């Protein structure tokens, strides 16, 4: 975690010269550093193009801030160099808070749901659509990475057809801004009021509101109790008046997102040598199978039953040995 070339000059030019301390990275090419300068703290994000698109982050942050959401303020940016200096939200994440104290689960998940209710009430931002083509391409990551890792030969055309039969349920009218990676590790507890600070929103699109609910309540990185999932879905539906068809969209997007994540986590192991991520796949398979049990997903469920046997659904690194 050596600071990127040019970081010192960038910080000096904007009056933030000081100590640069490495922070943990994530599943992308982005890296993060805490900058301590003249009694102030900030976060330096290294998001090098072309692998990353820092301008998208800046654009979405500006849109969120303009609509009253707690995106980090931008102190300075050089998008071409991939350097962005952000407001420091501190180290208190929702993930650790709910893991350490079961008594705050309902309150913090409730706050996260209420934020999505507010987001759904705002006209969608000027972002690309989360359309059928992209949803299909993402679901295909399971075929592209997971199945080859285990040597599984599958019916690829049938997979596309199965998804095509159910994706009509997730084309929202009107659509909303979808943050796409909305979960407990990307929600910061800011200040004494524990306002939810948003991170990792640079891939925002315009799509169905159920997607961010899936991100939050079928969290690939921590177990969310089924009773918490049910209670929070009821909270969202009561606040928005979402009809019964909303749950069909929720389960279709749950299956789509979980299939995508299994593919991505396998890719992180096979391509990027990040061996932590395959160990998260059993949890994601549990969510996926729960969604596949819903009648709305019958075509996709039949495909999985015919192509990926239960004994090959799990940690791809362990199964490939």
Image (tube, rainbow, N blue to C red):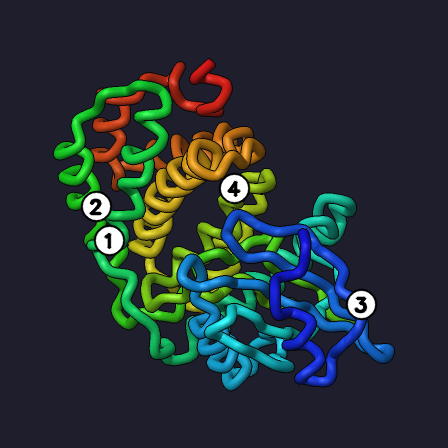
Foreground: disc 3 or disc 2 = 3
Residue 174: x and y in percent read 28, 72
Residue 133: x and y in percent read 20, 54
Q: Nearer the viewer, residue 140 or 28?
A: 28
Under circle 1, the secondary element is helix
Residues at marks 1 and 2, CA–CA distance in whole angstroms: 6 Å
Residue 122 occupies quadrant:
bottom left
Does residue 157 appear left or right of residue 83 in this picture?
A: left
Q: Report if the CB atoms under discs 1 and 2 are less than 8 Å apart.
A: yes
Residue 305: x and y in percent read 27, 22
Residues at marks 2 and 4, CA–CA distance in whole angstroms: 23 Å
Residue 254 occupies quadrant:
top left
Residue pointed to by mark 1: 169
286 relative to 163, above or below: above
In the rendered structure, which disc, 1 or 4, sits on the residue that comes first in sequence? 1
Residue pointed to by mark 2: 166
Q: Residue at x 58, y 34 (%)?
A: 276
Q: Report if the CB atoms under discs 3 and 1 are less than 8 Å apart.
A: no
In the rendered structure, which disc, 3 or 4, sits on the residue that comes first in sequence? 3
Residues at marks 3 and 4, CA–CA distance in whole angstroms: 34 Å
């Amino acid at each position: 975690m050596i600071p990127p070339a040019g970081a010192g000059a960038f910080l000096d030019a904007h009056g933030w010269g000081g100590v640069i301390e490495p922070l943990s990275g994530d599943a992308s090419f982005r890296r993060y550093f805490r900058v301590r300068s003249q009694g102030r703290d900030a976060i330096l994000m290294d998001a090098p193009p072309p692998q990353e698109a820092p301008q998208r982050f800046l654009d979405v942050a500006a849109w969120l801030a303009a609509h009253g959401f707690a995106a980090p303020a931008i102190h300075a940016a050089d998008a071409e160099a991939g350097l962005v200096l952000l407001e420091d939200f501190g180290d208190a994440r929702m993930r650790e808070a709910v893991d350490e104290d079961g008594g705050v689960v309902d309150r913090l998940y409730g706050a996260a749901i209420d934020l999505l209710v507010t987001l759904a009430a705002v006209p969608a931002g000027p972002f690309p659509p989360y359309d059928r083509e992209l949803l299909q391409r993402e679901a295909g990551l399971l075929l592209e990475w997971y199945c080859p890792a285990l040597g599984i030969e599958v019916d690829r055309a049938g997979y596309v057809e199965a998804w095509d039969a159910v994706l009509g349920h997730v084309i929202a009218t009107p659509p909303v801004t979808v943050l796409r990676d909305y979960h407990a590790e990307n929600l910061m507890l800011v200040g004494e009021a524990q306002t939810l600070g948003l991170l990792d929103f640079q891939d925002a699109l315009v799509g169905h509101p159920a997607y961010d609910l899936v991100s939050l309540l079928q969290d690939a990185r921590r177990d969310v109790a089924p009773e918490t999932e049910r209670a929070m879905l009821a909270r969202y539906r009561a606040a928005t008046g979402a009809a019964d068809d909303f749950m069909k969209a929720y389960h279709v997007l749950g299956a789509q997102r979980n299939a995508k994540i299994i593919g991505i986590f396998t890719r992180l192991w096979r391509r990027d040598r990040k061996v932590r991520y395959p160990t998260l796949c059993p949890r994601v398979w549990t969510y996926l199978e729960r969604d596949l049990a819903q009648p709305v997903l019958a075509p996709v469920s039949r495909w999985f039953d015919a192509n990926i046997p239960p004994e090959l659904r799990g940690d791809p690194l362990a199964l490939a040995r």
